[in-house]
Amino acid sequence: MDLFFFIPIFGLIALVYTFVQSSWVSKQDAGNEKMRSISGHIADGAMAFLHAEYKILAYFVVIVAILLALMGFSNEKSHWSIGLAFIAGAIFSATAGYIGMKIATKANVRTAEAAKTSLSKALKVSFTGGSVMGMGVAGLAVLGLGALYLIIKQLIAPGAETNSEEMERAIEILTGFSLGAESIALFARVGGGIYTKAADVGADLVGKVEAGIPEDDPRNPATIADNVGDNVGDVAGMGADLFGSYVATVLATMVLGRETLSNDAFGGYAPILLPMLIAGLGIIFSIIGTFFVRIGDDAENDTHKVQNALNFGNWGSILLVAISSYFLTNYLLPDTMELRGFVFTKIGVFGAIMVGLIVGTLMSIITEYYTAMGKRPVKSIVKQSSTGHATNIIGGLSIGMESTLLPTIVLAGGIWGSYLCAGLYGVAIAAAGMMATTAMQLAIDAFGPIADNAGGIAEMSELPKDVRERTDILDAVGNTTAATGKGFAIASAALTALALFAAYVGIAGIDGIDVYKADVLAGLFVGAMIPFIFSSLAITAVGKAAMAMVEEVRRQFREIPGILEGKAEPEYEKCVEISTDASIKKMLLPGSIAIVTPILVGFIWGPEVLGGFLAGATVSGVLMGMFQNNAGGAWDNAKKSFEKGVEVNGQTHYKGSEMHKASVTGDTVGDPFKDTSGPSMNILIKLMSIVSLVIAPTLALMHKDKIEKGRAEQIEKPTARTGGNHTATTVLPGVKKDSLAGNMKVSEVRGGINEDGEFVYDTGDIQEIQLSNKKVIGLGTNSQMNDLYNKIKIQDKSVLNESDWYTVENLFFASGSADIVPGSEANLQNLAEIMKAYPDMKVKVGGYTDNTGNEATNQKLSELRAKTAKIKLLEMGISPERVEAEGYGSRYPVCETNDTDECKALNRRIDVRVLEM
């Protein structure tokens, strides 16, 4: 357990690095008076937005926290402190956005000043600024999640086993932290996206298209708002976004890790510990990776050298995570584990992590192909710009749709591959592996808007042309890394949402999602609709705010004489106010939809319909995110292609040409795609899954009768077909039917209960039996394992009868636990040896409890015990495909009265029956 204390330490290391690097950036030269003045305007506008946004969100956080606390108070599987965890997640997420905004508004002007010296110096300042944000976000996530886990564990479940109700409650409280983080992330991403794109579209349409002035020209009244928007959306919004993603990915793996049966050196906690350690080590390797992002002082006007430097740091971090994961899985995990009937190995877990890293890499490469300048997709949009605005739009839409093909195949392969490696835990740990280098990924992503702002400041300050050329190189690389980062983010969101979905199914108490049911199918369609209506609201908000911005810019050009001649200063603050007001008001409705709809569906129609709803929303949201991000990125770089000139039909076209104007139109359409609704898709699908996970215990309680009815129907179906696994008058497994009449009498079984309350069978004299493989075992003459062996030996087909179950006598478990009491596995070992001697033999292990406690708890405990017995057989050398395991709770007692200690002790058992021989 001591290793858990290392998790917050990793977070503190990241925050110390953040402080040191932030201090270094602050000490750099901020340029002349005009540069500092412009930078001050940008910083003031950015912080004004942040304060206004956080003020509104504070009310939301308090109200939701109170509701969560009330819900937790009324449910024994939750706790009122989930409300406090929600507040903590919201505060940490908001802090992550604040750190990013603060450093970005410091680094932008210092990058512009550094660009006077060299491209190398400008890269160092801008990337260091980005790394402050990257490490700050990752450090806060690991510190918050790690420290909160330790506190909750100590208060709620001290000394508890992983499969206990106390640990289930502790992890449920932790989901509140993730819900707080993702809620703030969605509002920050949507609000920031509306702000930045309203300003950007307004500035482009009037400035570039109508007035014919360059981008970031100080004569454009919207140019300050545009630069503020880069920080609000691409820095603060992205910081809160990836903070939430980081937390959700680790949490999803922890939830499934708690369910995983693992006989490890950490008391079964290794599957919970692993994702947290991977996240912590990912921070260390990301810090190491930052030192590789360097170019020589002689590197001028070369985007490839800058891109290669960033790639070197990124790939280096990923490689270190891959190597360390091998040693980490070997050290922490046992040879075999099981989750919901799927048995996997520690090598399988390592394989799943590798699948995650490969999927993330491939998604980045594919996204770069579809959005980078000089590649076939962008060149095709450039060419279609030659025939007008409409064909440019058509080209961008078709490229966006086409770009979903390869990523979907890669993602589907990643899901299937990680599942084959380690089941549902493999899917979750693949996402955790992919997100391990989030700190480095975010450092690279954040450097882009810092460089973009630096270019804007250079333009508005009228710095020499070579300064703007250097910032444009950094900005061009930043656009590519931003696009690839979005591809990476949507892939991790898909894997995380799937893992959260799997966790939800378990906590909601349902056995699966049956799409053959009409209500579930209806939920699937409604869920698939949500990303479309969400996108519609976000894009509409951008359109309306952009219209207001266009009107304001036109008014100033019309009413303030001398602006276009550079003789009068525009009213920049008016445009900042328009973007701020629009983004704050318009972010509330789409954000509320993501939170309210899963609650309504779950409470009204139940957990299974909500499962169908989540499935539809996840698939639809992932595809919508891919389409919008890639279409917007391709439109953007098609426009940027004209800055250096493009040749179409033997003629070179530059800025200001009709083709360029068509590409600007495409870019303005793509702006809300790639910077508002597209990036919000990954938060949307995760947030809805987390909301569902938080309310799952309450749904399980509310719809208990409906769930039990469905489960009973599923049990009755095979019983009706086969004549029944168990009859109403249950026969003691291994004893002939005619030896019992009606209910079993305890006196007919030899043995009695011991001081621990367990029934100790008298199995008779032990006789040595030599099996066909020459192995000698000892079986009691009265034992049911002896009866089983005798039938197997003579190939008696009656042993395959579905009602013929044999009790594994004197196999005991710790009270209320799935841990086998040491020294009680003798008959389980005998069963393993018999199976080794008869390699075609396959068995099913059944777990049973007495009727003490509630049925849901008994059902879960019986499943865990059956799976533990299966894992023991695997550890004894039996291959997984030869053993099935199922829990039956208290439904099939061998002593039906269930009213004495002896009777209850007899009913707590592990039975086995032969499937094939």
Image (tube, rainbow, N blue to C red):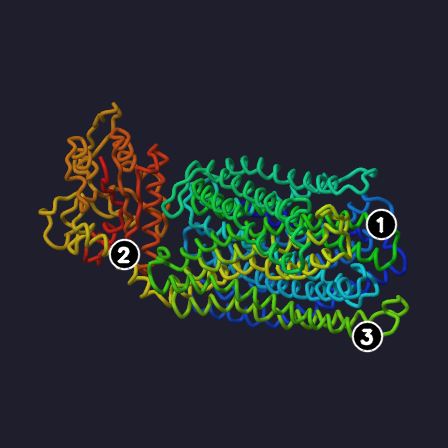
- Residue at the far bottom: name it: 559
For the residues bearing labels 2 and 1, Cβ distance under 8 angstroms: no
For the residues bearing labels 2 and 3, Cβ distance under 8 angstroms: no
Residue 558's label in the rendered image is 3
User: Which x, y percent locates residue 356?
Assistant: 53, 43
Query: Callout 1, which amino acid?
Result: Val
Say how many tags the image has: 3
User: Could you tell which of marks 2 and 1 lies nearer the N-terminus?
Assistant: 1
In this picture, residue 861 sits left or right of residue 316: left
Residue 408 seen in the figure: yes
Residue assigned mark 2: 714
Q: Where is 826 relative to 906, above or below?
A: above
Q: Badge 1: few (under 14), some or many (20 or more) residues near its Cα, within 10 Å?
A: many
Cα distance in 3D space between marks 2 and 1: 71 Å
Residue assigned mark 1: 467
User: Which x, y percent locates residue 467?
Assistant: 85, 50
Q: Where is 228 relative to 744, above or below?
A: below
Numbered disc 3: secondary structure: helix
Numbered disc 2: secondary structure: helix
- Mark nearer the viewer, 2 or 3: 3
Residue 139 seen in the figure: no
Q: Nearer the viewer, residue 114 or 806?
A: 114
Q: Badge 2: few (under 14), some or many (20 or more) residues near its Cα, within 10 Å?
A: few
